[in-house]
Image (tube, helix red, strand yellow):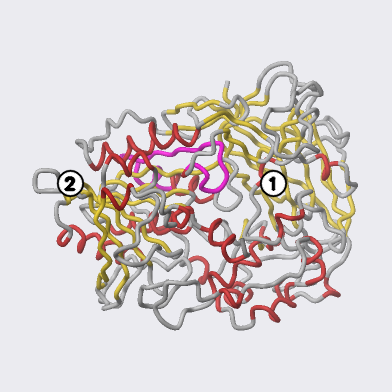
Amino acid sequence: MNRLKLIVALLSFALASAQVAAQNTYVKDNYTKTDTYITMRDGVKLFTSIYVPKNASAQQKYPIMMQRTCYSVAPYGADKYPNRLGPSTTMMKEGYIFVYQDVRGRYKSEGTFTNMTPVIDNKKAKTDVDEGSDTYDTIDWLIKNVANNNGNVGQWGISYPGFYTAAGILSNHPALKASSPQAPISDFFFDDFHHNGAFLQSYFFTFPVFGVQKKDTTTTAWYNNQMIRTGTRDGYQFGLDLGPLSNADKYYKDNFFWQETVNHPSYDEFWQKRGLLKHYQPNLKTAVMTVGGWFDAEDLSGPLNIYKTIEKKNPNAYNTIVMGPFGHGRWSSETGHTMHSNVYFGDSIATFYQKEIESKFFSHFLKGNGDKNSNLPEAYMFDTGLKQWNKFDQWPAAKATKQKLFLGADGKLTFSQAKTAGSVSYVSDPMKPVPYTEDITTSTGFTPHNYMSEDQRFAGRRTDVLVFQTDVLTEDITLGGEIMSHLKIATTGSDADFFVKLIDVYPADEPNNPYMPNKNITLSNYWQMVRSEIMPARFRNSFEKPEPLVSGKKTDVNFRLQDVLHTFKKGHRIMIQVQSTAFPLFARNPQKFVANPYKATQADYIKATQTVFNDSFIEVDVIK
């Protein structure tokens, strides 16, 4: 499998369901396919494939299930059928009218592609178009022109198609009765390409996919010749050899998205107008079920924050969330034994989700009476420590209480603050950055996935990583909800990143599971990553206006880690690690403040001593 095929496969699980399989003729036997163009209000035509059940009639009408994507609606051609339709085989066999559409500027659709199309709340002219208006115009055409539909439309999508689903909610079309944004992007400054503004260098190889405009409608990937051939499978070494990001222009001088990224290093108007969250106003009519994976290395912020924002602004809307023990989009296909990295969570969990959650949601709102009594909970959340589903009436859980875990100068992690002041320091050298993983082969593709639950012993045994851990737990402790890191730091430099990891330390007698993918790893004393996040100190006061650190001055650096639901079992320990590099997952901070880190020179990269004071703490939600 070449690099392009690998990237496309990881980018969109929709494409995985769109590969022709000669041995499986279910779709062809049971659905009639039509390819057509739908004209938007500004005259741009979007290519659309429509699959109608063959038994559809005036007496047997079906709702419409729609996915809009930038990753191709293949296979193209009226006589070409995919292996599967819809979010799952379950829903395909239950019967829906399935619709797939190439968004503007992608594959067979006309127009110009824009990453995270800015939302226009008040449209005054036909030329004022966004994903909401394109969704509205598409739904309107489908309802009026596709025979034997029942007047109800649902939308779903994973990853970028998840963004199009989340943006489609803003269409407010009366026929859009159910939307399920899955692993959706909500803001490129906090999802995917950045975390709190820190650039994910792991996305470096993806820019051709998002930053090259096609010249004409096409059924093939036009950006293939722009893909970087590294000449190595060692992504860590490739990143070091690349040097400062200012050297990347030799690859991406003509890549419009790379140039936009480089020229907007802070959360300015360019990024702000691409964010979705501020546009969810209190007029939501569509039922929403947002879906995410606790180990989604690409889009964990998106689903949690879309759910919370809609909940806050539309408290009376039908708005629910599902979070499972999955990597990016992995709930869309069954693997049998549900694994993430070396951790086993149970069997057939994706099938359970598809049959007992997803299918029931869409059936209720598109085929049933569509009231709020769907028999699904507000929050269907998987406890990744106990390895079981839990149901909540709200999220974060109502019974959660906030507690503080203090980072002791002696390496202890405790629920009480030390009586005397103290600190611990480490030297961060951007020329010898901490690897984010031991598996270097995952650093030259699209984005890494396994690190979200990987063993962290390799990092914690370095001198440039601080380790704080509790005593052995005498009872289970369930962290269920939000996590805030409150670091009190000082540095000898003028800028720094702080990467904080929440880790479950297994006991020495922990047995291996039967499905361990890596025979060189043992779960005895395994340090499982549960959650992590990075924060550039330059943004500690404002993402819009970065500020240098004052060398030697004690400074607050506060930031949110994404939510968890994880029970740390009796006999385990809770650990926090703090470091300043995680390479090449994140680009290296020069540690000398520069106006634009993307344009830093080699001379700007300096060693710095980072000090963490013992009044630093991690605030967690504890469920009793």
Q: Give yes or no for residue 323 being in the magenta stretch.
A: yes
User: Disc 2 marks which amino acid?
Assistant: Asn
Which quarter of the rendered picture does the N terminus lie within?
Answer: bottom right
Check disc 1 and give the amino acid type. Tyr
Mark 2 surroundings: few (<14), some (14-19) or many (≥20) residues within 10 A: some
Tell me the quarter of the picture where residue 394 sits: top left
Q: Which mark is residue 451?
A: 1
Instruction: Write down the region rendered in magenta.
Output: 309-331
Tag 2, which secondary structure?
loop
Distance between mark 2 and mark 1 Cα atoms: 47 Å
Q: Is residue 73 above or below residue 351?
A: below
Name the foreground residue: 51 vs 544.
Answer: 51
Residue drawn at 33 percent across, 47 percent down: 26
348 sits to left or right of 521: left
For label 2, the residue is 55
Q: Quadrant of residue 441?
A: bottom right
Q: Residue furthest left?
A: 58
Q: Looking at the picture, how far across and down is residue 385, in whole percent? A: 63, 28
The residue at 45%/27% (across/down) is: 391
User: Residue 135 at x, y = what percent?
Assistant: 30, 62
